[in-house]
Image: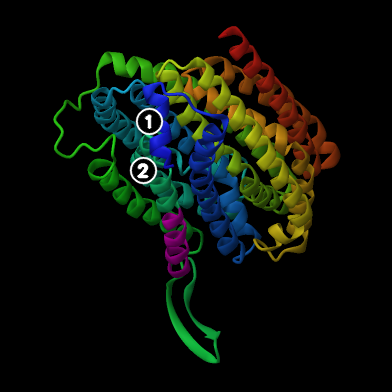
């Protein structure tokens, strides 16, 4: 039975067996996991390709990586403020209202993406210095962030389109296009990062043209891949989406106060929460920076490598937002609760297994991104510390997706703020001078376990109260 038919049962109030609930969760989770993994693989490819240029090139991207996540996360929060409303409208069976919200979202987040991109371009020159980066890596770091910011409006529209399709229950198309973006990123990077060169293979020698742009080429490669996928995503949303296509439909694009107010209610706490998390990550970068270029590079590689472990959790969280959002919009409280617990437990199981894989394969994973022995040793040690926190990290990730689906983002955002700033940064600032990079990642491990506990407690409290 297709996921669309099972979602129709949710919207129409028809009963669902436990098997059908599990099947629907898997049908939505697997493509969402693939989409999340492909986005991380793209970062992994960038890191590996740039890593071959040396520690300085890797550190220049690692220095600004937390700031790029901050900007990307705020774009995501802006889009989610509207996509959750669409999920609720679809759950209630109101297709016309869902399309009206989509039209308004295109204008609102489009303007936001342009303004945010201009802001990033404006600060790109000064950002590496603010972060305490070594003079040797500041130029490349600044140029990378400048190009990244120039493509932010494209990223904003792409993430809005993908979010709308996911909230309608279509996980397959965003997943396939995310994988396409990963492939395009490899191709563009191959020609833009490296200079023209001779490649030996199959007993033959091939001349390959290249721009030789280094770190700048990595930024251009990612941006161009995002542009191609954004065009395809918009085309599908406008012309092929079963629930949300706008071709042939009439309606106003001007955002209404009611829609904007709801978007702010959902999106602003998410944006603040993401800013808090990324601000903490930036502070972590500031704590790591005095440890030297090797520590910065190892920290960046470890973060990218760990993403391969926790992105399945974010994929399941996307599915949780869709399932809980549509069940909540349909007024089916019992089904909302069941989907919440199914997705959270599934996330903990999957990320627990990924944690074991990460622990065992840490040296190999880091080794594929850098040939430097000192960077490899530091990065592998960090990954093995973090592996123990993955199941509880999953609990916080997926539970947050559940709360987003319900439009309940204020308290979870506060929980993230308290956990990261009161626990992680305090411990990291204390342990870094004593233990180096190992102390920073030990602080992160302890904090993630604490965060998972408080999110499980909050989840239980919310559904006990709603009975």
Whole-percent x, y for residue 466 in the image: 56, 9
Residue 124 located left or right of residue 311: left
The residue that disc 1 covers is 8
| Magenta stretch bounds | 179-191
Instruction: Name the residue at 46% across, 64% down.
Output: 189
Question: In the rendered image, which quarter contains the C terminus?
Answer: top right
Q: Position of residue 25 (x, y in %)?
A: 53, 36
Can you tell which mark lies on residue 352? none
Kind of element beneath mark 2: helix
Verify whether residue 190 appears in magenta.
Answer: yes
Q: Quadrant of residue 448?
A: top right
Residue 376, given in percent of the width and then of the height, sits at: 74, 58
Q: Secondary structure at mark 1?
A: helix
Proximity of marks 2 and 1: CB atoms separated by less than 8 Å: no
Decide: few, some or many residues near mark 2? Use Cα within 10 Å; few <14, some 14-19, many ≥20. Answer: many
**In the image, is residue 45 above or below residue 4?**
below
Residue 209 vertical position relative to residue 397 in the rendered view, above or below:
below
List the single residue furthest toward the bottom: 203
Label the magenta part by its dominant secondary structure: helix
Can residue 289 be seen? yes
Name the front one of labels 2 and 1: 1
Identify the residue position indicated by label 2 in the image.
Answer: 158
The residues tagged by marks 2 and 1 sit, at their Cα atoms, a distance apart of 26 Å
Residue 63 percent location from the top left of the image:
59, 46
Assign the N terminus to one quadrant of the image.
top left
Magenta stretch: residue 102 in it?
no
Q: In terms of sequence position, does the residue under pointer 2 or pointer 1 come before the other?
A: 1
């Amino acid at each position: 039975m297709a996921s669309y038919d099972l979602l129709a049962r949710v919207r129409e109030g028809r009963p669902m067996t436990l098997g059908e609930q599990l099947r629907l969760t898997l049908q939505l989770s697997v493509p969402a996991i693939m989409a999340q993994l492909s986005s991380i693989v793209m970062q992994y490819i960038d890191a590996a390709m740039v890593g071959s240029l040396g520690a300085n090139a890797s550190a220049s991207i690692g220095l600004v990586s937390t700031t790029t996540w901050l900007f990307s996360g705020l774009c995501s929060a802006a889009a989610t403020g509207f996509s959750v409303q669409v999920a609720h409208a679809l759950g209630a069976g109101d297709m016309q209202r869902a399309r009206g919200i989509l039209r308004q979202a295109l204008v609102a987040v489009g303007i936001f993406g342009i303004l945010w991109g201009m802001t990033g371009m404006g600060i790109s020159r000064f950002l590496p210095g603010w972060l305490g980066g070594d003079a040797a890596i500041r130029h490349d770091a600044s140029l990378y962030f400048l190009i990244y910011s120039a493509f932010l409006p494209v990223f904003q529209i792409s993430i809005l389109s993908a979010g709308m399709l996911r909230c309608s229950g279509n996980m397959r198309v965003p997943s396939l296009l995310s994988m396409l973006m990963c492939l395009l990123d490899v191709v563009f990077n191959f020609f833009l990062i490296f200079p023209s060169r001779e490649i030996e293979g199959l007993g033959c020698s091939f001349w390959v043209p290249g721009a030789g742009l280094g770190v700048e080429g990595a930024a251009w490669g990612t941006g161009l891949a995002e542009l191609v996928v954004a065009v395809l995503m918009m085309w599908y949303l406008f012309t092929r989406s079963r629930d949300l296509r706008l071709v042939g439909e009439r309606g106003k694009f001007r955002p209404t106060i009611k829609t904007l107010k709801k978007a702010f209610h959902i999106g602003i706490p998410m944006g603040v929460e993401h800013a808090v998390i990324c601000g903490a990550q930036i502070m972590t970068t500031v704590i790591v920076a005095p440890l030297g270029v090797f520590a910065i590079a190892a920290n960046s590689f470890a973060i990218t490598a760990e993403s391969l472990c926790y992105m399945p959790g974010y994929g399941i969280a996307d599915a949780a937002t869709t399932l809980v959002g549509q069940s909540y919009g349909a007024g089916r409280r019992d089904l909302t609760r069941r989907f919440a617990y199914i997705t959270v437990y599934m996330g903990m199981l999957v990320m627990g297994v990924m944690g074991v894989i990460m622990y065992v394969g840490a040296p190999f994973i880091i080794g594929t991104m850098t040939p430097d022995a000192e960077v490899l040793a530091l990065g592998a040690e960090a990954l093995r510390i973090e592996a123990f926190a993955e199941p509880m990290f999953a609990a916080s990730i997926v539970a947050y997706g559940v709360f987003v689906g319900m439009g309940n983002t204020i308290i979870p955002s506060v929980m993230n703020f308290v956990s990261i700033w009161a626990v992680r940064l305090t411990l990291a600032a204390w342990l870094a001078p004593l233990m180096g990079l190992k102390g920073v990642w030990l602080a992160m491990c302890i904090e993630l376990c604490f965060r998972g506990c408080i999110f499980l407690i909050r989840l239980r409290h919310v559904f006990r109260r709603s009975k």
